[in-house]
Image (cartoon, helix red, strand yellow):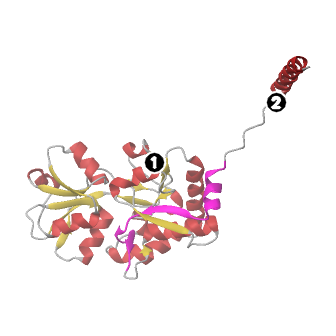
Amino acid sequence: MKKLLLPLFAVALLAGCDKKAEEPAKPAAAAASYIDKIKARDKLIVGVFTDKPPFGFVNEAGRYVGFDTDIGRQFAKDLLGDENKVEFVAVEPASRIPFLQSDKVDLILANMTVTPERKEAVDFTNPNLKVAVQALVPNDSAVKSLDDLATRTTIVTTGTTADIWLTKNHPDWKLLKFEKNSESLQALSAGRGDAYAQDNLVLFSWAKQNPGYRVLQEKLGDEAPIAPAVKKGNTELRDWVNAELAKLGEEKFLLKLYDQYVRKELSDDTSPESVIVEGGKWQG
């Protein structure tokens, strides 16, 4: 009897396999969108500077504030309904791209200048600022032009536009590099270098707060846009930010932040349009 049952069982098993093979495969569940991922987490994670006033810094109360940081809060409010549903992650110039690539942050809002090299590594949204790189020197310095720096020491912060530009265009110049903007400025004030090359908005702000320094008139390269950045290929979040910047442009939101944080740092005759890019509409 057992000998008869075994063949019958084998036939039934094969028939079951054939039946399964005939059944259509179930479609794979659609991958959740990146925006849905942020909403499920109920938190937007943004990389910001902590030592680059007026764009990103920590105030006396220990609160993250600044032009870029407040944009991050507005993004959280419009995406998640609450400006406090944002987690700020401190970044340095050289860590901005790696933090995006390793998914430590959703978005970088850290005064990041758009360059061809960076566009290979991340996706930039439309811009929110414009900037040029210049150099800061003590008032009593013999340095009168950029050419004078050829035989001197120029301080830069690693990974900044100034670092990249000088390394590419003046590889023979002596550069003294630091990881943080605050460390670079301390080095200049301590006389460890002859000049500090950085985004001019940062230099104007620091020179106004620290009398005894001047910004050289010449620019290192052309004026360039500054923009938020997302991980390469994250077109969904990029497009959301672009739409958000356009909406905020209708409200003149960046002008409000300029008046709050930036205006007092610059000379009275500075035009806001020479600094901010309202609505993401870059005119290069």
Residue 121: horizontal and vertical position, in percent?
A: 43, 44
- Which residue is the extreme one toward the front? 1
Return the x and y of residue 54 as percentages of the image width and height.
Answer: 37, 72
- Residue occupied by mark 2: 24
Q: Is residue 268 visible to the viewer in this orientation of the structure?
A: no
> Residue visible at 37% across and 71% down?
57
- Mark 1 = which residue? 101
Q: Quick one: label 2, few (<14), some, or many (20+) residues within 10 Å?
A: few
Which quarter of the figure has residue 202?
A: bottom left
Q: Amino acid at mark 1?
A: Gln
> In terms of secondary structure, where does tag 1 sit?
helix
Mark earlier in primary sequence (2, 1): 2
**Is 187 situated above or below 9?**
below
Above or below for 18 versus 207: above
Residue 125 shows in this picture: yes
As rendered, which of 46 and 135 lies closer to the eye?
A: 46
Residue segment shown in magenta: 32-59
Q: Quadrant of residue 170?
A: top left
**Residue sitting at x 57%, y 47%:** 235
Asked where in the image residue 42 lies, by quadrant, the reply is: bottom right
What amino acid is at disc 2?
Answer: Pro
